Image (cartoon, rainbow, N blue to C red):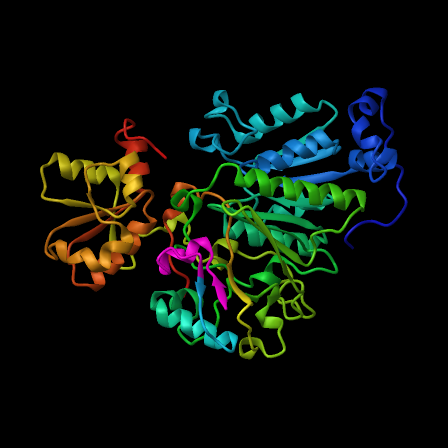
Amino acid sequence: MATTTEPITLPQLSNDEIARYSRHLILPEVGMEGQQKLKAAKVLCVGTGGLGSPLAFYLAAAGIGTLGLVDFDVVDASNLQRQIIHSTKDVGRPKIDSAAEKLTALNPFLNVVKHETMLTSQNALEIIRDYDIVADGTDNFPTRYLVNDACVLTGKPNAYGSIFRFEGQASVFATERGPCYRCLYPEPPPPGLVPSCAEGGVLGILPGLVGIIQATEVIKFILGKGEPLIGRLLLVNALDMRFRELKLRKNPDCPVCGTHPTVTQLIDYQQFCGIIPEQKAAAVQNGIPQMSVKELKQRLDDGDDLLILDVREPFEYQIAQIGGRLIPLNDLPKRMNELNTAQEIVVQCKSGGRSQRAAEFLAKNGFKKLHNLAGGITAWSNEIDPKVPKY
Amino acid sequence: MTIEIPTPLRVYTANQSAVAVDAATISEAVSALLTRYPEFKKHLYTPDGKLRSFVNLYLNDEDVRYLPQREDSSVRPSDTLSIIPSIAGGCLPHGRALLAHKR
């Protein structure tokens, strides 16, 4: 059920469109029919961030007829280093409006469909059903698994791309003959084990490289030309500038695309990925009391004897700090003897993930009065002191 | 043979991107790596010794899960064993730092 095989009437191109797509039209692999197929195509781009920016831009330029965008985020200054569809003037605007504006400015023949929502188990099938192919440019494991399962269940191919620091992965999943994302990775890592981009960083051009690989696969799929990236995992290393390819196999025991699937409808992906809903986030996590930045400010203003322990890396400390004592997370085992186990300590990092792990480690090693600073230095900058730079 | 270490896990190999080991099989190669970098173990294997489901091992371009002899497959000095973890691909919004480990 991947694509319809019935003959369909392809839309005609206007003279303006013929002029615009002339470099495609003279390519035998595209030609008039290929360009008409692109015009007839409906592509869903999940996310308009690092991967989604170049992806949507090139698809719009190439003459895709209908481009659906899914995003509910707002443009932040820290996005602009890689999310090239957004401009400085767009900071604070919904990404979907900013993206739609750029895309229709580039190509007025494009029909942009805005889905200003978070993709959820409740709406994913309904949204995806209207499209021919999905390009997954999301940024978190729950949505990755949601997009995969929804694509398998609706029979839509998924042009996949993912990035971390200097490395990227790309493939085409969820086609009838090929493997899906779950064939490759049946389960996500537990939260906190793999650092997020916010903690790990990412080279700005990397999503450009990977997003354009996804766009290429989308175009090839629509044209029915070339060798699709099905059953192959392309690894990109921008630092070494090396591209490698690994073989992917369809797992007959895959819970969603295998011969006896156990996942036959969308599930709770937050729970699947081990994430506790925010509203249920406890004041104490794994035995560590959580302290808000407001509470920390109050305690400091009261002159309480608190040690802020900053467990980030030295280069992060150089960018911004709130007077904490710097011991990077990985140095803690050999340097914790520099600290007093009876001292009241507020552990702090960028957004609260590493500091939680550090606090759990210290608790196991006899430290008594520990807090984790919820939201880290970013929350401090947002809520207490905007002069502290956010990065 | 050479074991390639992915970026997210290099913190457990003193930032080495590739580690050379002497080994006759994949199992031996992994054991040699874990002997040298014991911290690595919990990121590769569950407490009961199963390869974690978000990490894949590749001998050259083949998934070790699909080799006839799996981890017991023999290796040559020119072979490369790659550790390929899943990456989600972007920045988690700050609010989602409130996470708990799945048991």
Residue A328 left/right relative to A250: left
Q: Residue at x 14, y 37 (%)?
A: A300
- A257 or A326, which lies in front? A326
The answer to which quarter of the image holds residue A249 is bottom right
Single out the residue that lies furthest toward the front. B77
Residue A342 appearing in the image: yes
Q: Quadrant of the C terminus of chain A?
A: top left
Left/right placement of residue B77 relative to residue A219 reads left
Q: Residue at x 52, y 56 (%)?
A: A268
Counting the numbered discs, the total is 0
Query: Does A180 sit above or below residue A254?
Result: above
Magenta stretch holds residue A268? no
- Left or right of A134: which side holds A357? left
Residue A18 percent coordinates (x, y): 83, 24
* A113 vs B3: above or below: above
Q: Which residues are magenta?
A: B1-18
Please give left or right for residue A341 compared with residue A289 in the image.
Answer: left
B15 in magenta: yes
Report the quarter where the N terminus of chain A lies: bottom right
Depth check: A292 or A162 in front?
Answer: A162
Q: Nearer the viewer, residue B23 or A39?
A: B23
| Residue A315 percent location from the top left of the image | 30, 40
Residue at point 59%, 79% (across, down) = B69
